[in-house]
């Protein structure tokens, strides 16, 4: 598959590698247009289906993770063409379907749909240069890919309202304090640090990784009792895997586990 709006490569030395996807529309600060979203969906699905890939890292450039929806392509839509044409629903949510962990690696701007795309990932790592925001109000709209729903869940209502209503940008340290990002790394060498985290994930058992991320994401969808019940069922299901037996046996034998990823 030849891509025009993203760059795709496989990184790492271990038996399972990292699928690295870079948004690559530098002239538009990686703004999200239909071709980019279609390509992103294809690349994510291909890595998800590849047993040699442990996890996926989604990143942009030094200047911008992504400056949001491609404004020229949506500027002239009317209600019906936006609604019936499936703006957002058509091809924006591929990342939510991925079973493997998806790590967002954000340097520079993550604005509007860019911030929303990062929040669809399982966790976000930021370079010191990162700037997060939902500036839609400045162009006369509101977020359309989860910004009003996911941002309050990540950072709480007060800060989400502040960011959404004022359109101000939040730097990496503030994002760390607010809980939007897991860790902040120096801008120089930032992606290498995230790829090191990815390597740790690649060395884990695949079914445990998949169920772990599914359960944590479920915590944002279900009431506590229901979520805890789902977790218990998933935990019990792990006793049907080779890797559970191997992991516990290896611990007791004081050796490294040999996963079969099943
Ligand atoms: C298309 C964009 C773009 C965007 C930047 N560019 N953002 N093109 N869509 N969202 C283009 C500019 O037009 C410009 O092209 C080039 O990228 C560089 O941008 P500059 O503005 O010259 O750079 P700078 O001064 O450094 O400012 C960077 C910036 C600013 C702060 C990120 O570009 C900006 O505010 N962008 C818009 C951010 C935004 O409003 N995002 C939300 C979009 S709505 P030229 O050709 O002039 O050099 C959204 C809703 C999603 O995301 C909901 C789901 C559909």
Image: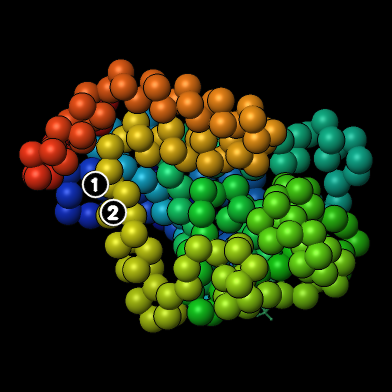
Q: Residues within 10 Å of mark 1 (few under 14, many from 20)?
A: some
Q: In the orientation shown, which residue stands out farthest toward the top?
A: 240
Q: Position of residue 111 (x, y in %)?
A: 68, 65
Q: Quadrant of the N terminus?
A: top left
Query: Considering only vertical position in the picture, is 218 above or below 102?
Result: above
Measure the alpha-carbon separation of dots 1 and 2: 5 Å
Whether residue 20 is visible, yes or no, is yes
| Residue sitting at x 47%, y 40% | 213
Left or right of 98 in this view: 205: left
Q: Position of residue 10 (x, y in %)?
A: 29, 50
Given contact means CB atoms under 8 Å apart, are the residues at marks 1 and 2 in contact?
A: yes
Say which of 103 and 108 sits in front: 103
Q: Which quadrant of the render holds ligand 1? A: bottom right
Q: Position of residue 200 (x, y in %)?
A: 28, 54
| Residue sitting at x 47%, y 68% | 183
| Residue hosting label 1 | 203
Say which of 29 and 133 sits in front: 133
| Residue hosting label 2 | 200
Residue 205 sits in which quadrant? top left
Say which of 114 and 202 sits in front: 202
Q: Position of residue 12 (x, y in %)?
A: 23, 55
| Element at label 1 | loop
Residue 138 sits in which quadrant? bottom right
Left or right of 83 in this view: 29: left
């Amino acid at each position: 598959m030849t891509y025009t709006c993203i760059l795709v490569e496989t990184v790492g030395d271990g038996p399972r590698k990292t699928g690295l996807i870079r948004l690559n529309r530098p002239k538009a600060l990686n703004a999200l247009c239909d071709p980019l979203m279609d390509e992103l969906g294809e690349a994510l699905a291909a890595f998800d289906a590849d047993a040699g890939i442990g996890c996926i890292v989604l990143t942009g450039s030094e200047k911008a993770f992504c400056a949001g929806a491609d404004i020229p392509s949506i500027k002239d839509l009317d209600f019906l063409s936006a609604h019936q044409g499936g703006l957002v629903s058509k091809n924006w949510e591929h990342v939510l379907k991925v079973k493997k962990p998806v790590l967002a690696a954000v340097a520079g701007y993550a604005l509007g749909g860019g911030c929303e795309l990062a929040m669809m990932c399982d966790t976000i790592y930021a370079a010191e240069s990162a700037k997060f925001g939902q500036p839609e109000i400045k162009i006369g709209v509101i977020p359309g890919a989860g910004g009003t729903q996911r941002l309050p869940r990540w950072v709480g209502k007060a800060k989400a309202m502040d960011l959404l209503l004022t359109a101000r940008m939040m730097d990496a340290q503030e994002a760390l304090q607010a809980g939007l990002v897991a860790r902040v790394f120096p801008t120089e060498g930032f992606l290498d640090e995230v790829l090191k985290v990815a390597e740790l994930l690649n060395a884990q058992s695949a079914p445990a990784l998949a169920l772990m991320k599914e359960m944590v994401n479920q915590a944002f969808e279900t009431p506590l009792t229901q979520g805890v019940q789902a977790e218990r069922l998933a935990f019990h299901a792990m006793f049907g895997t080779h890797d559970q037996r191997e992991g516990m046996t290896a611990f007791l034998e004081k050796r490294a586990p040999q996963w079969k990823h099943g």
